[in-house]
Image (spheres, helix red, strand yellow):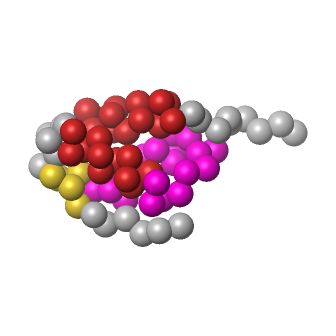
Amino acid sequence: MPELWQTPNSSAVRQAIVCYLIENVERPVVSISAAILAVRERFPGCDLTDWQLGDLVARSAVDAAFAIHFDAGGR
């Protein structure tokens, strides 16, 4: 049976991160682990490590002037 999901490209992952930040704009601090979970739920085929996703989340959050809670574990 073929896979129902595809590996996302980096722009799709970045867009998912930005959407997560927009959806949580009322929160004063962005949780790296919560953002990683949200991206993995949207893209189960994402082959980026938690470290790589966390880096993308942190960069996007800093660019958007969010405070960051560095609570991610590595995979």
Count all numbered tags in the image, as a single digit: 0
The reply, left or right, for residue 29 in relation to residue 59 is: left
- Judge whether residue 32 is colored magenta: yes
Q: Residue at x 83, y 36 (%)?
A: 2
38 to 69, vertically: above or below: above
- Judge whether residue 35 is colored magenta: yes
32 to 3, vertically: above or below: below
Q: Residue at x 55, y 51 (%)?
A: 48
The reply, left or right, for residue 56 in relation to residue 61 is: right
Q: Residue 36: image x %, image y %? A: 42, 52
Q: Residue 26: image x %, image y %? A: 14, 40
Q: Is residue 24 visible?
A: no
The reply, left or right, for residue 74 in relation to residue 17 is: right
Choose between 18 and 4: the one closer to the eye. Answer: 18
Quadrant position of the N terminus in the picture: top right
Q: Is residue 64 visible?
A: yes
Choose between 3 and 69: the one closer to the eye. Answer: 69
11 to 45, vertically: above or below: above
Q: Residue at x 29, y 50 (%)?
A: 58
Q: Residue 60: image x %, image y %? A: 29, 41
User: Where are the magenta residues, as a range?
Assistant: 31-52
Outermost residue, right side: 1
47 to 18, vertically: above or below: below
Q: Residue at x 37, y 53 (%)?
A: 55
| Magenta stretch, main secondary structure class | helix
Q: Residue 75: image x %, image y %? A: 53, 67
